Image (cartoon, helix red, strand yellow):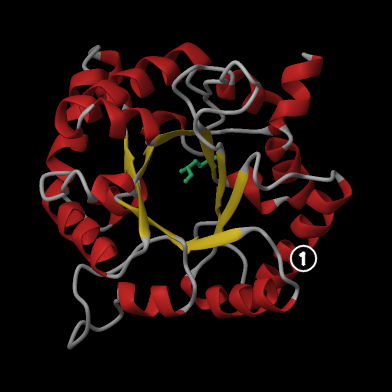
Amino acid sequence: MTISQNGAFVRQPLIAGNWKMNMDHVQGITLVQKLAWTLKDHEHDYDRAEVAVFPPFTDIRGVQTLTLGDKLDLVYGAQDLSAHDSGAYTGEISGQFLKKLGCTYVLVGHSERREYHNETNEVIASKLAAAYRHEVTPVLCVGEGLEVRKAGEHVAFTLEQLNESLAGVSAEQAENLVIAYEPVWAIGTGEVAGPADAQELCAAIRGALAERFGEDIAQKTRLLYGGSVKASNAAAIMRERDVDGVLVGGASLDAEEFANIVRFEHHLVTD
Ligand SMILES: O=C[C@H](O)COP(=O)(O)O
């Protein structure tokens, strides 16, 4: 992340936990409670780093009730949304419902959606439009697979995904946008792209955003890295200039571990 002369972050870091298809609604409430208590024990300053969880759809109502009831500062989002607003789309979830459930964010185009649900950049563009229609901030996920990385085409591939997915997004809408760079080969595999790899792609993404929406918006947009992030590697990744946060999968299911990722600043000082 980038730090200004007075020690403030230029862009507020975002530490996001994607639970994927883990945690039923009872387990979900327990995890959020434990996370909130642990962060309270750590005297976490939520203004300094935002904390978001992305539970399964079935958990969101419980998480909403808990965060409202206990006046928790952490925010939450959904892992996907429909491109449609309502109607005969069995099994789909409208952005309208997510808005009503108090979701701040929604993941769009996660690599697992691209892979298992054949989501193309075109589909993802229509889901981004739906997120904007319902005023839920999208976290657009992009990133290359192993073959592309081995061929040395990871920057071009990722920027193409980015540009095609953002095809319908206006500069005004882009004021509310988070991008997550997640190299597919590093997701759930224990393989971590090094901090320099994360920086390379985040810098390239920021450059592409500048071309598309102007330098001002590019400098304000938060860029996350995702792929086998743990407490032991989060600080080194977060130290990179263009990385403003992390999107954590497996390690977000353990409240202590995730809270230690949120404490990345502590590790920055002591490393
Ligand atoms: O959304 C999260 C990413 O897919 C990373 O997952 P992971 O931390 O389990 O590798």
User: Residue lying farthest front?
Assistant: 6
Q: Quadrant of residue 89?
A: bottom left
Where residue 153 sits in the image (x, y, percent)? 21, 16
Where residue 34 sits in the image (x, y, percent)? 80, 60
Where residue 253 sits in the image (x, y, percent)? 66, 53
Judging depth in this view, the residue of 246 and 73 nearest the camera is: 73
Q: Quadrant of residue 167?
A: top left
Which image quadrant: the C terminus? top right
Q: Give amino acid for label 1.
A: Gln
Horizontal arrangement in the rendering, residue 88 relative to residue 13 (left or right)? left
Horizontal arrangement in the rendering, residue 58 relative to residue 264 (left or right)? left
User: Residue lying farthest bottom?
Assistant: 88
Q: Is residue 179 above or below residue 125?
A: above
Horizontal arrangement in the rendering, residue 167 relative to residue 203 (left or right)? left
Where residue 18 sits in the image (x, y, percent)? 52, 52
| Residue at 52%, 21% in the rendered image | 2
Residue position marked by numbered label 1 in the rendering: 33
| Residue at 24%, 51% in the rendered image | 173
| Residue 144 seen by the camera | no
Q: Secondary structure at mark 1?
A: helix
